[in-house]
Image (tube, grey):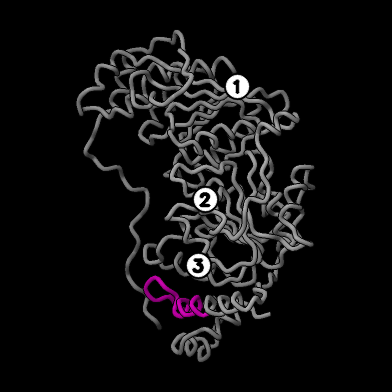
Amino acid sequence: MATADTLAHLALGPLPRRIVDENRIPLDLIPVYGANIVGITEVLKGLKTLRDRLRAEGSEIAVDRVSCSGLAVAILPPLREHQVEAMRSFLDHGEPLSGTLDAPPGFGKTFTSLHIAKNQPGAVLILVPTTIARDQWRKTLRTRGVSTFVLGEDRVFRWGEYGAILATYWLVTTKQTALSDDLASKLSKVLTVSYGTLILDEVHKVPAPIFSTACGMVFRRTTIGCTATLIRSDGRIKDLDALIGGPVRFSISYETLTGQGLFPEVEDKTLSVPMHTSFGDRMEGGEFNKQLLATLNPNKLSLASMIVRKHQQKSIVFCDWVRALAPTTSFLRATQPLPVFGPLSGASKPRERESTLSAFRNLPTGGVLVISRIGEMALDVPDAAICIQISHTRSAEAAVQRRGRITRKSDGKQPKSFILVSQGTPEAQNIEGVAEAGDVEEVEEPVRTALLDACRNTNKKPECPVKKRNKRRKLLG
């Protein structure tokens, strides 16, 4: 079988081929010009032409060999009954089929998909929606003995060296001209590999126009999509089968698993909280941000703190609005004795994110994690028992994902999910079965003033956490 290295060399145009031949350098060291590796564009075109022809002829797609530790030698845990059933639904006489695995959070979709992919030779490419999901996949793969390259984190990429490659949807689908020269070169190399399996984590994200192009960029034999929510508000979920090349091959509901005693039952409550007078009076006019007023309603934050103090368990507080994260964290630290971690958002640095999540997971008893929407998917804290949404999302898939953070089975856990909404505000609309929250503690005036300050509209643009890229072009030497 021809490898990417061989095919790439054959597909090179005259200039890049001469550079390689005359200088006797491997493809890893092809120089960078602008934001593209010289010759990689030709390589990709050549590979696509070759594979399109192979598909049209009905020939088998060649996959690249893995010289180091791949999935074939991975030490994976044995599968449980339903996971075995899921794996078998993806195998045809031992050959993996493309399709979607639909199961609730905590089912074990990660290991199930790896067991399926283990039946396919070659490397596996795993695309994920968030850096938190990427970090958890990396930890899982490396602890199981799989050589893993993380696009955007690791420095050196060489063909055939990795059993698994990890990347976010955003990074793979971003135009290379918008990336740094180094990152663009690594992405180009990743896209020249012919993979055995493509795993799409949270595959319900794939039909979005911004991410759907990822499926056409990756050369692979099999595609496995994993999701807990086959829901999209835009109706594009119907496009999923065509995008990944197969139907939903296994689906199991949360209700089925709870009915069999395999998952804990979650107590769900949606509580309507009166707007504090000092906030409600400011809902009219443009001086204050209405969404932040509804989110940082002192009565709502007071109720959230009361819930945490009452249950004394690990709690996750979700907040959509980044500007509200810090005030929420400060309020919780000041009003109850349990340790409060965060806030975490997409702007958090990798080390801060990893250390915060590690400290929260290692807590022996109760504590609070304040996090933005980045915690909706793949946040794995098995003993977390309380989910509090202080800013309600209209997205059905996001609501299911947030609730899913507390559905993992753990000894003695009785999970509870709370959605808190402020009365008379847009977030209270379209909420069915809203119950009154009852009396909440009065918040002192200095604290209310500080919260109001966070809700003021401002023309100051937030500082961008991403540094401007050096646009100087590297010249061929």
Disc 3 secondary structure class: helix
Q: Answer whether labels 1 and 3 touch (C-beta < 8 Å).
A: no
Q: How far apart are marks 1 and 3 (CA)?
A: 46 Å
- Sooner in the amino-acid sequence: mark 1 or mark 2: 2
- Asked where in the image residue 66 lies, by quadrant, the reply is bottom right
For mark 3, what is the residue?
A: 186
Determine whether, in the image, residue 275 is placed left or right of residue 133. Answer: left
Q: Residues within 10 Å of mark 3 (few under 14, many from 20)?
A: many
Looking at the rendering, which quadrant does residue 53 occupy? bottom right
Judge whether 90 appears above or below 449 on screen: below
Task: Tell us which disc is closer to us: 1 or 2.
Answer: 2
Amino acid type at mark 1: Glu
Dot 3 or dot 2: first in sequence order is 3
Q: Is residue 287 left or right of residue 76?
A: left
Which residue carries the number 1 mark? 267
Mark in the foreground, 1 or 3: 1
Magenta stretch: includes residue 418: no
Location of the N terminus by quadrant is bottom right
What whole-number distance in Å separates the C-alpha atoms at marks 1 and 2? 31 Å
Residue 238 - label: 2
Who comes first in sequence, dot 1 or dot 3?
A: 3
Identify the magenta region.
Answer: 30-46
Using a 10 Å C-alpha cutoff, classify the residue at mark 1 as few (fewer than 14 neighbours), some (14 to 19) or many (20 or more): few
Measured Cα–Cα span from mark 3 to mark 2: 33 Å
Question: Residue 39 lies in magenta, yes or no?
Answer: yes
Which amino acid does the dot numbered 3 rest on? Answer: Lys
At a point 45% along the width and 37% down the height, the residue shown is: 395
